[in-house]
Image (cartoon, rainbow, N blue to C red):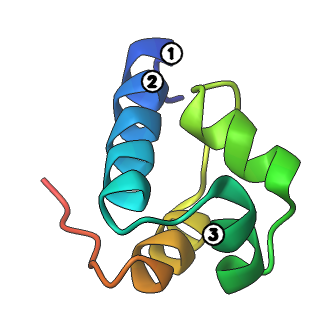
Amino acid sequence: MVRVDERLRIGKIISSIRESKGLTQEDLAELTGFTKGTIIRIELGKFGVSIDVLATIAEALGKRVDLV
């Protein structure tokens, strides 16, 4: 199970990359096919993401998922 602090860390990274690209949460939602509410919950660390969801978000942001 993913710890809360790890969800927060991932959410902050997603938010930071999104903002650096000038995208709103609504823009990212449209690019990924997820709802704006889902994006908000992910960025706030309220929602644990699967590797598939993370990969979809990374692709929409022009990034890749690197595993430890």
Horizontal and vertical percent position of residue 17: 32, 57
Please name the amino acid that badge 3 sits on. Answer: Leu
* Dot 3 alpha-carbon crowd within 10 angstroms: few under 14, some 14 to 19, many 20 or more: some
Question: Where is mark 2, residue-wise?
Answer: 8
Please name the amino acid that badge 2 sits on. Answer: Leu
Mark 3 residue element: helix
Tell me whether the residue at label 1 lies in contact with that at label 2, contact meaning CB atoms closer than 8 angstroms.
yes
Report the residue that reaches farthest toward the left: 68
**Rendered image: mark on residue 28:** 3
Earlier sequence position, callout 1 versus callout 3: 1
Mark 1 residue element: helix
Q: Nearer the viewer, residue 62 or 48?
A: 62
The label nearer to you, 1 versus 2, is: 2
Q: Is residue 25 above or below residue 29?
A: above
Residue 34 is left or right of residue 15, and the answer is: right
Q: Is residue 9 above or below residue 60?
A: above
Question: Where is mark 1, residue-wise?
Answer: 4
Please name the amino acid that badge 1 sits on. Answer: Val
Horizontal and vertical percent position of residue 54: 50, 64
Q: CA distance from mark 1 to mark 3?
A: 23 Å
* Dot 2 alpha-carbon crowd within 10 angstroms: few under 14, some 14 to 19, many 20 or more: some
Earlier sequence position, callout 3 versus callout 2: 2
Report the residue that reaches farthest toward the front: 22
Q: Is residue 65 above or below residue 13?
A: below
Horizontal and vertical percent position of residue 30: 76, 79
